[in-house]
Amino acid sequence: MDAGAVPFDRSRIGRILDSTGFDPANLSIRETNRLVTLIEQELNVRFVRMEFGVPNLPYDPIGVETAGRIEAERQASAQYPPFDGIPELKREASRFIANFLDLDIPPECCVPTVGSMQGGFIAQAIAGYRLPGRDTILYLHPTFPVSMRQTRFLGLGLDSIETADFRGPALLAEVERKLSGGRIGGLLYSSPNNPSWIALKEEELRGLGELCTRHDVLAIEDLAYLCMDFRQDYSIPGRPPFQPTIARYTDRYFVLISSSKIFSFAGARIGIAAFSPAFLKMSAPALVPRFGTANVGHAFVHGGVYCTTSGVPQSSQWGLVGLMRKANAGELDFVAATREYGRRAATLKAIFRRHGFRLVYDNDLGEPLADGFYFTFAYPGMSGQQLMLALLHYGLSAITLESTGSRRGEGLRACVSFVDAAQFPLVEERLACFRRDHPLPEEPAAARSARSGGGVQ
């Protein structure tokens, strides 16, 4: 497989797309990923792949091995894991949360889940069914598309706010307006945000927490990209600054922590759902028909984890024990490792801008947006769908912002994880060809002519 001259054969790409049966106006992440793989195989070409938000850094093998993965297989391979997690992981997760979020959440409230997606699924179900008539999840958009699919799968309502349009006091006012309607059971968001990479400020989280308490709404905080706002140094355990979190300002929260991005431990499919100790005493009779209990904390473990996966495999749990244990001891600087994503994003943003693209989300409450796992871009005169399909012919793949719930319909989301320094020249070359074939309206004829004949500039 080689890079291949661009643009690729349009008719062949069209036939491949037709053969999949996918709707080009509504491609999911997985469908885009599958389509690009088919094009690569059929045309024997290599894409610059930015559609899939998966990690691509080496994980720490010592942390996993010394944790007892082999020990787990030797001693526990014939035993089911506890539904609420092995004690060693619950203790390390509680310590990890204290060290990096400055929260005192007891081990009893730290539950391993099959990825943070399972934690989010159960949290949404509890938030949406806990109080009669409060069956809608309010999203701070944009968001991870599959979270919205979970909401619909659960039969819950979905409402949203475009976060970039309402920051600071305006965000709090808009959230309060929505909560005052009496339909909202849960507030769901990620910070740093997938895909905009906006990071909510401490004062915003304080206000959101107070609103959740006042209106009895459960916050579902997705920290898949924990400590990855690289404008701050969150790398030293037990020392400020700490990852901002709503859990400091309300006792109505689920905090979802993923091992995939921060530890590059995605194949193990394990995360931690940490919930408020208040849930251990909170009663919600409306949960009984679905969860078999009115106790919110018990509902998460026995009504949620037990009836969906019956727990997380012991080998994955032991692996995460080792990673968290080393991070807690200051022996594994996972923040330093993930800074590589920020470096890649900074370079790729500059390349895209050089070739006429603009960043869709580029401001974070008056500050320049951080460089991280994702960035968003657009090209003048094209919708997001048009741009996504056009870039396929130039060996570049991304997903539309519309699929994330964003109201920025002109943009795409790019994940930087699979684009390393060796591919930067290829990105430069392909974007130069794209701009040659799609000149900007304001470019003078001489510039267009020079660009079409000159290759990479």
Image (tube, rainbow, N blue to C red):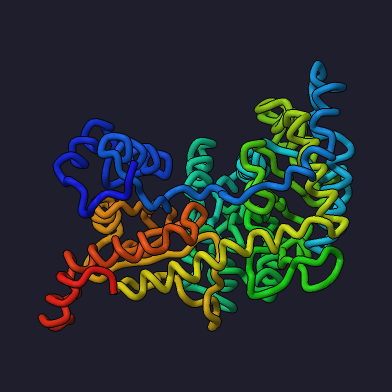
Vertical order, 102 against 446 (above or below): above
Quadrant where the C terminus is found in the figure: bottom left
Residue 324: image x %, image y %? 80, 49
Left or right position of 449 against 21: left
Q: Nearer the viewer, residue 440 or 116?
A: 440
Quarter of the N terminus within the rendering: top left
Position above or below: 291 against 421: above
Residue under the point 64% across and 59% down: 338
Tell me if residue 214 can be seen: no
| Count of labels in the image | 0
The residue under the point 67% across, 28% down is 289
Residue 99 appears left or right of 380: right
Residue 328 point in image, percent of width and height = 85, 55
User: Which residue is situated farthest in the top direction here?
Assistant: 78
Residue 110's place in the image compared with 293, above or below, is below
Q: Is residue 428 visible?
A: yes
Q: Residue at x 70, y 62 (%)?
A: 335
- Left/right placement of residue 387 relative to residue 439 reads right
The one nearer the camera, 44 or 163, is 44
Q: In the picture, residue 111 is in which quadrant?
A: top right
Is residue 434 depicted above or below 257 in this figure? below
Write down the quadrant of residue 293 in the picture: top right
Task: Give coordinates of residue 190: x percent, y percent.
Answer: 59, 58
Q: Give residue 107's position: percent from left, percent from top.
A: 87, 45
Residue at (10% x, 80% y) in the render: 445
Foreground of the two, 401 or 171 = 401
217 to the left or right of 354: right
